[in-house]
Amino acid sequence: MFAAKAIGNLEKPEFYRELADQLGALLAGESDPIANAANTSALIFQMMPDLNWAGFYFLRSADELVLGPFQGKPACVRIAVGRGVCGTAVERRASVLVEDVLAFPGHIACDAASRSELVVPLIRNDAVLGVFDLDSPLPGRFDNDDQVGVERLAAIYLAASS
């Protein structure tokens, strides 16, 4: 049985290396995308400081994301492609890091406490499958090290899930 191991005070690149190792171990041998999304959300929410939401939205049609497994307060169920940070990440086919969501045009406030956000698209074989979304109540919580680290975690999720 998997048990998360506390990660001490490390610089962000080392923190994400350790978290990636733990995520790889957690998902090893399991290929179900929903089960893996649930465990990925739970591990990241548990291990990363200053989050108030961590979870997935899956592209269920060409123009709409639908809520998947997550940790945090109840969330918006459907998000149009091109709308909000999640929809923008799908439209751009690239990660979107927002230091202050109040300054992001069209931000969707599922939780009014959220102040910064990082969204990584899930792309396999050139097809966008959805996004992995992190929210924080702190402005400026996420930086480029976080983006690189979370992109690596998303890649581990994609590799494990079929």
Image (cartoon, helix red, strand yellow):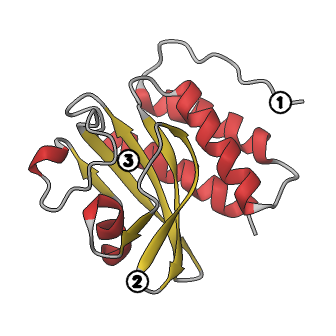
**Which disc number belongs to residue 147?**
3
Q: Amino acid at mark 3?
A: Gln
Identify whether 56 is placed above or below 89: above
Pointer 2: what residue? 63
Callout in the foreground (1, 3): 1
Residue 40 x/y as whole percent: 64, 44
At 61% from the left and 30% from the top, the residue drawn is 18
105 horizontally vs 6: left or right: left
* Pointer 2 or 1: first along the chain: 1
**Which disc number belongs to residue 2?**
1
Quick one: SS at disc 3? Answer: helix
Q: Nearer the viewer, residue 21 or 119?
A: 119
Q: Amino acid at mark 2?
A: Asp
Residue 144 x/y as whole percent: 30, 44
Identify whether 82 is placed above or below 118: below
**Residue most extreme to the bottom:** 62
* Pointer 1 or 3: first along the chain: 1
